[in-house]
Amino acid sequence: IGFIGSICSTKAKQVTIYEANPKLIPIINHNCKLNGKNFSVYNYAVVNNSDKRQIKFYIGEHFWNASIVKTNGFKETIVPTISMNEIVSNLNPSFLIIDVEGYEVELLKKYSFPNSIKKILIEFHPKKVSENEIKDLKDNIIENNFKLVAKNLESELFKRD
């Protein structure tokens, strides 16, 4: 937990992490310090551009079991939200890494990626969303002048010049 942020911070000028699961924030911060890294970690669920300032979030027994989708046996908690547009306009990122457990389709539906974004690494979740929804999302990324340059299991890296 926090490993990807640590790896990114070896090359990036700035790394900002948004994590919806409040239980993971202290662990990410601890691992950041253990690795001698410096990045910002915020407890927000990143959402599309809705007006909701908080949402219900569901946490399972294991750290990887969490979702904004109500799931039997998961505990409900309320987490603050931040919109994708707010993040992009405030930070002007060049690289997005997205792993939102099936919410990627809703988060990026018909999203117009600003020119500052040159790379997107995204994990798709075909067990949680349909293949057609994933195809539509990939088509939208490609329509924003990105090219698929690498793929490993359910994660894909897109780049543009």
Image: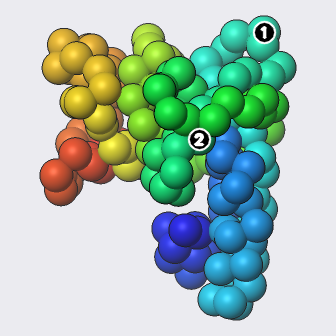
Q: In which image quadrant can residue 147 be found?
A: top left
Find residue 50 and report its horizontal and vertical position in percent. Answer: 70, 10
Residue 144 location (% of width, % of height): 37, 24
Give the secondary structure at mark 1. loop
The amino acid on which the numbered mark 1 sits, given as a three-letter code, is Asp
Q: Residues within 10 Å of mark 2 (few under 14, many from 20)?
A: many
Instruction: Tell me if I can see residue 2 in this picture.
Output: yes
Inter-mark Cα distance, 2 to 1: 23 Å
Q: Amino acid at mark 2?
A: Ile
**In front: mark 2 or mark 1?**
2
In the foreground, 158 or 40? 40
At horizontal 47% and vertical 26% (from top left) the residue drawn is 72
Label 2 sits on a secondary structure element that is strand
The residue identified by callout 1 is 51
Q: Quadrant of the N terminus?
A: bottom right
* Image-based side of 92 in relation to 100, left or right: right
In percent of width and height, residue 45 lies at 68, 34
Examine the rendering and report whether any part of residue 98 can be seen.
no
Q: Residue at x 61, y 18 (%)?
A: 48
Q: Is residue 13 above or below residue 112?
A: below
Q: Count neighbours of disc 1 (C-alpha within 10 A) and say few if under 14, some if 14 to 19, many if 20 or more.
A: few
Return the disc, 2 or 1, that comes first in the chain's sequence.
1
Residue at 59% from the left image edge and 41% from the top image edge: 59
Height in image: 80 above or below 94?
above
- Residue at screen point 22% across, 30% down: 126
Q: Quadrant of the C terminus?
A: top left
Mark 2 lies on residue: 59
- Residues 68 and 140: in front is 68
Marks 2/1 in contact by CB < 8 Å: the verdict is no
Residue that extends furthest to the front in the rendered view of this protein? 73
